[in-house]
Amino acid sequence: MEFTCTVCNRRYTPELAMFRCRCGGYLEYREQRAFPSAALAERDHSIWRYREAYGLPSECRRITLGEGRSPITRLEVPEGTMTAKLDYLQPSGSFKDRGAAVLISLLAYLGAQHVVEDSSGNAGAAVSAYAAAAGMRCTIYTPDYTPEGKLLQMRLYGSEVRTVAGTRDDARKAAEQAGTRSAYASHLWNPAFVLGLQSTAFELWEQLGEELPATIVVPLGSGGYVEGLHRGFDVLLNAGYLREAPRLLGVQAAHCSPVHTAFEQGREHHSEVEVAPTIAEGIAVQNPPRSPAVLNALRSSGGFTMAVTEEEIRSATAALLQRGVFAEPTSAAAYAAWRRLSRSERAESVVILTGHGLKQLTKLTDLVG
Ligand SMILES: [Zn+2]
């Protein structure tokens, strides 16, 4: 397995303390490997049925909690029927388990005994869960607005939680510093995390077959999910399993929209924007390190971005709850964007609901109770 710097093309064999290039650039796994479709019938229903696509060394032991294979269902909402992939139904309650399973498997293979991560919630919970499964110590740096339920979840898995005053970026910097002394299990930087997120593209292809939607609507913070989906569909195209990939609609909160702003301005790197607190704290990432890859994924899929307001997110969260869907506000932001599409666009879309509302009981009560 080899990672390549996206800035200077230097190549690296993955090592514990490495999460980016010496030049500061982010790394990517350039090789593309497809899984053999004929073998799928005999494989278990988790992300590991597509194991070849993650590029892990063959001796690498899988750290797994049964992640993947989330249901796709048709939900009746006020605007009509919405096709949703319920990706909050994962072991730790969010899509991040897909990336954490692959990343922690790799770090365990490299000999990690202690991992650090920075997160506003879901990634921290996911890394905590898989670190526990692997028998590793885990330290999570969180911004001070992290919801209490998510902090408790990290602690219950046995992680040490360190709250960093200031912005989301301050938590990232603290983790990066600590990561040079142990292993930085970064969902923001590490390409292995993105490799695991490809699995959703493979599942959509397997679950929907010929009826793959024209548009996939997904919340966008660091943009890892957009990058992973794009990569996954690329693997399917190159393997000849698919003729046309869906376009990706990345949804940001208007209060923190550096990627949306850059997309609108035609830029290749995220924009510097004024930010304000948002109830969709899971997508409040002011400086996403992999933004060029994310913007490229959006554009080459023929996709686009939207920035939804706090009122739209609040209303979308409430509407889902009223129909029995317990998604967190960050997930509901995707539904808020779907509401803005035309009737025919809505009919040909799948909305990915990424995080479980059970982690945020207090917040949801304040919001709609
Ligand atoms: Zn470099």
Image (cartoon, rainbow, N blue to C red):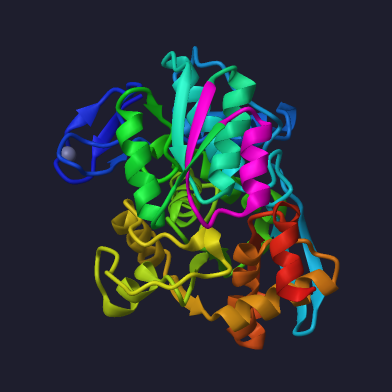
Task: Tell me the quadrant of the picture where the C terminus can be found.
Answer: bottom right
Q: Answer above or below: position of 93 versus 287.
A: above
Q: Position of residue 12 (x, y in %)?
A: 25, 26
Q: Residue at x 19, y 42 (%)?
A: 24
Task: Tell me if I can see residue 203 in this picture.
Answer: no
Q: Is residue 284 magenta?
A: no
Q: Which image quadrant for residue 125?
A: top right
Q: Residue at x 37, y 23 (%)?
A: 182
Q: Answer above or below: position of 255 versus 206.
A: below
Residue 229 or residue 240, whichever sits in front: 229
Q: Answer above or below: position of 288 versus 31.
A: below
Residue 172 or residue 305, whichever sits in front: 172
* Residue located farthest toward the front when viewing the structure as drawn: 165
Q: Which residue is drawn at 53% across and 57% down?
A: 145
> Left or right: where does residue 319 sit relative to residue 16?
right
Q: Where is residue 77 in the image (x, y as percent from the top left)?
A: 79, 78
Q: Which image quadrant for residue 364?
A: bottom right
Q: Answer above or below: position of 224 versus 366.
A: above
Q: How many marks?
A: 0
Q: Which residue is drawn at 36% across and 67% down?
A: 259
Task: Tell me if I can see residue 21 in this picture.
Answer: yes
Q: What stretch is highlighted in magenta?
A: 137-159
Task: Tell me the quadrant of the picture where the N terminus can be found.
Answer: top left
Q: Position of residue 234 (x, y in %)?
A: 44, 50
Q: Image quadrant of ligand 1?
A: top left
